[in-house]
Amino acid sequence: MSALAAVRHVLVVDDHADAAESLALLLQREGHSVDVAFDGRDALAQYERAHHDAVIMDIGLPVLDGYECARAMRRVQGDRALLLIALTGWGHPEDRRRSEASGFDHHLVKPVRPSELNALLVAAQRTE
């Protein structure tokens, strides 16, 4: 585990299984507890059960897209802290505006360095 890492319970959501599982492994190497979902409906169900500290989610998901899923997570989070990070191939200004309006805290465009994601997770832990 990195000396800077603060252990978080993270949900990684991406419909590309290889990408989701690879990111989950990288975050686990940093000491985080990680669950994985491959569509928005499963992600929401997992969040409702486990109330993760952070969700790293693609926007272009099947069943329930990332925008809708983020809005739904914000509705059920209650008074618990939740860091929502969009990790997507969509990087136009309108995409960023929509992700912010949906409740995402950060909008990152793929590919992203794992250290950048871990830094966001650690920084959020320090401000809670």
Image (tube, rainbow, N blue to C red):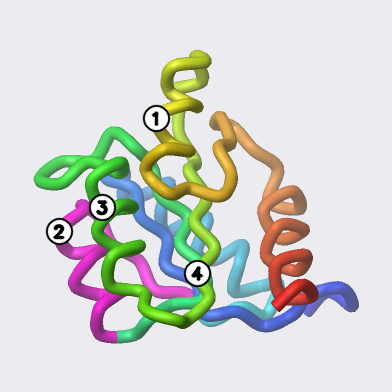
Which amino acid type is marked by label 4? Leu
Which amino acid type is marked by label 1? Arg
If you read the primary sequence from the N terminus, does the residue marked by circle 1 or circle 2 appear first?
A: 2
Q: Which residue is mark 4?
A: 82
- Inter-mark Cα distance, 4 to 2: 18 Å
Q: Which residue is mark 1?
A: 98
Which amino acid type is marked by label 3? Cys
As helix, strand or loop, the secondary structure at mark 1 comes to helix
- Inter-mark Cα distance, 1 to 3: 13 Å
Residue farthest toward the right in the current orientation of the protein: 3
Residue at 42% across / 67% down in the picture? 11
Main SS, magenta region, reads helix
Magenta span of residues: 34-49
Residue at 50% across / 69% down in the picture? 82
Between circles 4 and 2, the one closer to the viewer is 4
Q: Which residue is mark 2?
A: 41
Q: Residues at badges 3 and 2 in contact (C-beta under 8 Å)?
A: no
Is 45 contained in the magenta span? yes
Q: Which residue is mark 3?
A: 69
Q: Which quarter of the image is occupied by the N terminus?
A: bottom right
Which quarter of the figure has residue 76?
bottom left
